[in-house]
Image (spheres, rainbow, N blue to C red):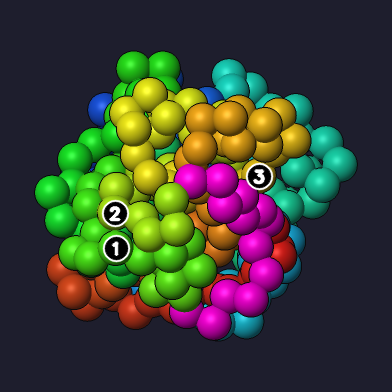
Amino acid sequence: MNFTTKQLDKYFKEILNIENFPGDPSQNGLQVDNDGAPVKKVAFAVDASMETFKRAKESGADMVFVHHGLLWGISQPLTGIYYQRIKFLMENNIALYACHLPLDAHPELGNNASIAKKLELIETEPFCSWRGYLIGVKGRLPEEMTPEEILQKAFPGRKTVQGLFKFGKEKNLTVGIVSGGAAEDVYQAIDQGLDIYITGESSHEIYHPCQENKINFLAAGHYETETGGVKNAAAKLGLDTGIETVFIDIPTNQ
């Protein structure tokens, strides 16, 4: 079955609760339209980049769905690389769809829910307020684990990380998760007495507070913590509509 970009826009807004996040700096939704042609294949990726778009074209995709889109804030001048990227999309009739905070926060398909599922967390609940939105998840491990064991369970094969501060318990039970660039939100994990906090990026400023508050901090990589959401959205789209999907993996090592 074929869908138009407008139909897919409505579909994604409904399943991802996109309109519940009006304060998101990302212009979530359809950022670049096509000429009305049916969408038969959607490429999913973390970042909107020229490499992503070129690989989407090579795969035969009619639309690209990303976590980090091109348009942020109220307006974006179409100059430099932004002009080149949008020009490429329009010349190749490829639509662009972006979903930022809703894809972090979604209780089933989101980035944080994906990590929580890998860790088999129980008693999960929303965690971490950002401008009034709860975007993360917290819960309890089924058994106590070291930070290294948590890393390998959540991100199998991951050998290098942005940061691992082992200032808390050797064996951890309670976990807070906020994917991407959320190092500063470790303070909310501290306030709630969690054993370990997982995010994507580290920060110089939180080293000593983590040490003095005796909490473990794991920054597993911005990219690494945000592949789950787009993969889940791809699987959901394929199951619900039969549209062909492909995941474009472009790790940034961050």
Find disc 2 in the rendering and name its residue. 173
Q: Position of residue 28 (x, y in %)?
A: 44, 37
Q: Residue at x 48, y 40 (%)?
A: 215
User: Do the residues under discs 3 and 2 have CB atoms within 8 angstroms?
Assistant: no
| Horizontal relation, residue 188 to residue 206: left or right | left
Q: Are marks 2 and 1 in contact (CB under 8 Å)?
A: yes
Q: Position of residue 220 (x, y in %)?
A: 57, 59
Q: Is residue 42 above or below residue 246?
A: above
In the picture of the structure, the residue carrying the numbered disc 3 is 202
| Amino acid residing under circle 3 | Ser
Q: Is residue 176 above or below residue 40?
A: above
Q: Main secondary structure of the magenta part?
A: loop
Q: Amino acid at mark 2?
A: Leu
Q: Quadrant of residue 101?
A: top left
Answer above or below: position of 66 versus 134: below
Decide: marks 3, 1 in contact (CB < 8 A)? no
Q: Which mark is residue 40?
A: none
- Name the residue rendered at 66%, 44% in the picture: 202
Could you tell which of marks 3 and 2 lies nearer the N-terminus?
2
Residue toward you, 223 or 92: 223
Compared across the picture, whether 121 is left or right of 207 comes to: left
Residue 155: within the magenta?
yes
